[in-house]
Amino acid sequence: MDPMDAIKVTFFQECDEQLAELESGLMALEAGEGDRETVNAVFRAVHSVKGGAGAFGFEDLVKFSHTFETVLDLMRSDKLAISADAMHVMLRASDVLADLVHAARDGGSVDQGRCDALMEELDQLAHGDAAPAPSAAAPEGDAPLYADVEPDEWGFVPLRVVMDDEPPVGEEAWKIIFMPRAQLYAKGSDATILLRELALLGDCEIEVDDTLVPSLDTLDANGACLSWTIILHGDKDEAAIREIFEFVEGDCDLIIERTSVSAAAPEPPPVFAPAPVIAAAPIAAAPAPTPVAKQATAPSAAAASDSEGKGGQPAANATIRVDLERVDRLIDLVGELVINQAMLAQRVAETGVARSSNVALGLDELEQLTRELQDSVMAIRAQPVKSVFQRMPRLVREIATATNKQVRLVMDGEGTEVDKTVIERLSDPITHMLRNAVDHGLESTQDRIDAGKPAEGTIRLAALHRSGRIVIEVSDDGRGINRERVRAKAIEKGLISPDVNMTDEEIDNIIFLPGFSTASAISDISGRGVGMDVVKRSIQALGGRISITSNPGKGSTFTLSLPLTLAVLDGMVVSAADQTLIAPLTTIIETLQPKAGEVRRLGPNRSVIAVRDAFVPLVDVGVALGFRKEAAQPDSCVVLLVESEGGGRAALLVDDIQGQRQVVIKSLEANYQRVEGIAAATILGDGRVALILDVDGLIAQRVSETRAETQLAKAG
């Protein structure tokens, strides 16, 4: 790959991160949950996109982001209020910015009229059509903060400090105060290079301030202790100066101001202190204009160094960007290593080597190291679900606006980690469920008030780990599922028979049938009957389950249960009808040896087993999977007491337990076809293929068959 192309790929990857940061920051500001650092983070995101776009010559992107950051700069300097109207414009501007980034990456185009309209709205905000923040109002009688200057190359009027009416004594010059932070050096930047570039603009007087340099025994090699004061002579444009610091402006404290220089020697540079606004005293003794100080976007390097030395905020962890294909290849190789380690252990065991021998002990250590290696490699792919969750507030906001409802989204567990493969396929199901919750779950504002509820509906999106799986919950405090209407609609569409008897759970699950919808008319949001069907198929494709809990008049909860990873699992190796199977260890509560009288027959093919004064359904795995026709004798078998995702318990009857091991998951559906009751396959230590049981599928199949037999008995 051409080096420039590789850099461009990295730029667009970083753009995706900056756009996500931008949208989440704007949503926080609109909800009133942001602070000054949020505004600074939003500004830095747009500024970073602009800087990279300028390096690659994406003029349309530079032009739009320049207008965008101008408004954000006003907001972070308290000259523009964070109002609902302003945030509405900025959210739409973030969409246009994302479209321009995608067009630059993919070679497409965007609606130029839409871009021009948004730029005009942003320009109106920047030039006073929106009310300024109270703190930005100048005292009566003061000189105006900004003056009319010539527009730049794109036609924009940059912000300039207005000089006093009385001209300053001496030569006009630029005064630059530059203090790097530790992260500037951590990212590979060099302050001396920036100073050399600055010297190319004209004659410079550079003075270094080393007053913050500690003694050698307390010196932090990764810190930043030096600052510089530079007097740049000449009439260079401020934009040319800022361009030099463009890529490091977020990693340093920087003040650029116009001043006058007399023949007297300049005063020593000021010592930076961690304060909200940093201002510098003028160098000349003559009266000088009052500068508009640049808002500090982060604590100074001295403060950062001091806080690190005293147990304050820790420095950010160093990261490295790696191609995902390399990580996948590494995971595949580790999976093969696990399989070969299991084969080696089994062959050594077959030779009759004693467990206390050096070979056996070495194999035990190899197994432990292999497991640790596998866990570490899998952790590389683990990512927090925040990357999916952070897109949802904007989605809920748009749907709430379209349906004219007041909705508040509460998110919990954004730091819950899951395999990247799972995360990439979570977005669509969660999107459909949130759309369904806003459109169908929540009542209209008036209906909520009439029902004695708050006018604002609440939707909760949560993620958590449970029994070795990730659980995603989408709940609302709406009307709940109207089961009579759902049943009537299903009969009307021919999805179920009018005379069939159904439980509440079965009626709730009708909404997952293809083509089902309770909407009276097709809209941009719903009505086609494909949303929840997509959710169920997507979750099943990930080896997961979805369940519904609904309380009429109080709301509904949709629960997704998914494996943490699609690569490995801990399983119990069992046998049934001469077949070797794997039962996921996370579903097993305990194992039992049935005794006489504990198993009771319910008809020719159904049984229950007594477990501590309670009866649970008994499923003969060999019969359920078609490995044998006749049920095995329970007293000569082993029972696995398991718990389904819905919380129900059941007992799986198997012939024997061979042991416990970690296995590498191989997709059966991708290599063969979907098989009911089977989740996937794996390769055992002896090279044989073993099937991994779908415990929830076996239980659901047993319940369905029992219900069908009961209905046939009633009909007969």
Image: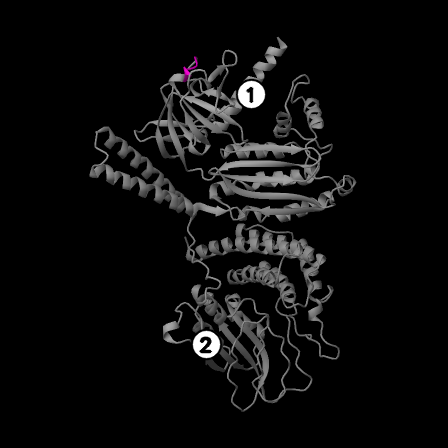
Residue 633 belongs to magenta span: yes
Disc 1: CA contacts within 10 A as few (<14), some (14-19) or many (>=20): few
Marker disc for residue 704? 1
Instruction: Name the residue rendered at 59%, 82% in the picture.
Output: 259
Horizontal side of residue 71 vs 213, given as left or right: right
Q: Secondary structure at mark 2?
A: loop
Residue 504 belongs to magenta span: no
Which residue is disc 2 drawn over? Answer: 212
Of callouts 2 and 1, the N-terminal one: 2
CA gap, disc 2 to disc 1? Answer: 75 Å
Disc 2: CA contacts within 10 A as few (<14), some (14-19) or many (>=20): some
Residue 652 pos. (x, y %): 45, 23
The quadrant holding residue 497 is top right
Residue 566 pos. (x, y %): 44, 37
Horizontal side of residue 117 vs 571, given as left or right: right
Instruction: Name the residue rendered at 61%, 8% in the picture.
Output: 716
Horizontal side of residue 387 vs 433, given as left or right: left
Q: Main secondary structure of the magenta part?
A: loop
Horizontal side of residue 662 vs 25, given as left or right: left
* Amino acid type assigned to the residue bearing label 1 in the image: Ser
The range drawn in magenta is 630-634
Q: Residue furthest top?
A: 716
Q: Nearer the viewer, residue 335 or 16?
A: 335
Marker disc for residue 219? none
Question: Mark 2–mark 1 contact, CB under 8 Å?
Answer: no
Q: Nearer the viewer, residue 404 or 274?
A: 274
The quadrant holding residue 370 is top left
